[in-house]
Amino acid sequence: MAKKGAPPVEITCPCCKAKLSVDPQLAVVLSHEEPPKAPNVDLDDTARLLREQEERREEKFKQSVEYEKKKEDVFDRLFEEGLKKAKEKPLEKPLRDFDLD
């Protein structure tokens, strides 16, 4: 008659990712569950995916170039407005803590 021992240990194989159920007392594999299969990828699909990724990269690059061009224009405009305000406003001596006494 079998002795009531420790419950089986569930282990995942680090190489193939299979799930194993092992009895620690008897040192035997009680059950084995194969890992899920990777999806079958066709080379035509792979080529299509690579082309799509290249197109997306190219589109993102174009967008970033446009953004950088616009950013420069915005900074130029802000600088011109700040310069205009600085010319309109008279120069004042800055207030110092020493002057408050």
Image (cartoon, rainbow, N blue to C red):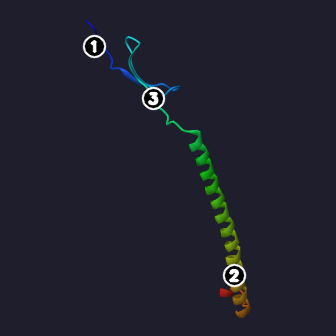
Q: Position of residue 28 (x, y in %)?
A: 40, 13
Q: Nearer the viewer, residue 67 or 82?
A: 67
Residue assigned mark 2? 77
Q: What residue is drawn where x is 70% and y is 77%?
A: 73
Q: What residue is drawn where x is 67% and y is 69%?
A: 66
Q: Position of residue 23 (x, y in %)?
A: 37, 16
Which of disc 1 and disc 2 is earlier in sequence? 1
SS at mark 2 in the image? helix
The CA distance from mark 2 to mark 1 is: 82 Å
Which disc, if any, is residue 4?
1
Q: What residue is drawn where x is 68% and y is 81%?
A: 78
Q: Is residue 75 above or below residue 47?
A: below
The CA distance from mark 1 to mark 3 is: 30 Å
Image quadrant in which the C terminus is located = bottom right
Task: Confirm whether residue 75 shows in the render.
Answer: yes
Residue type (three-letter) at the residue carrying disc 1: Lys
Which of disc 3 and disc 1 is earlier in sequence? 1
Q: Residues within 10 Å of mark 2 (few under 14, many from 20)?
A: few
Which of disc 3 and disc 2 is earlier in sequence? 3
Left or right? Give the position of 91 relative to 27.
right
SS at mark 1 in the image? loop
Residue assigned mark 3? 35
Q: Is residue 71 above or below residue 85?
A: above
Q: Position of residue 55 (x, y in %)?
A: 63, 56
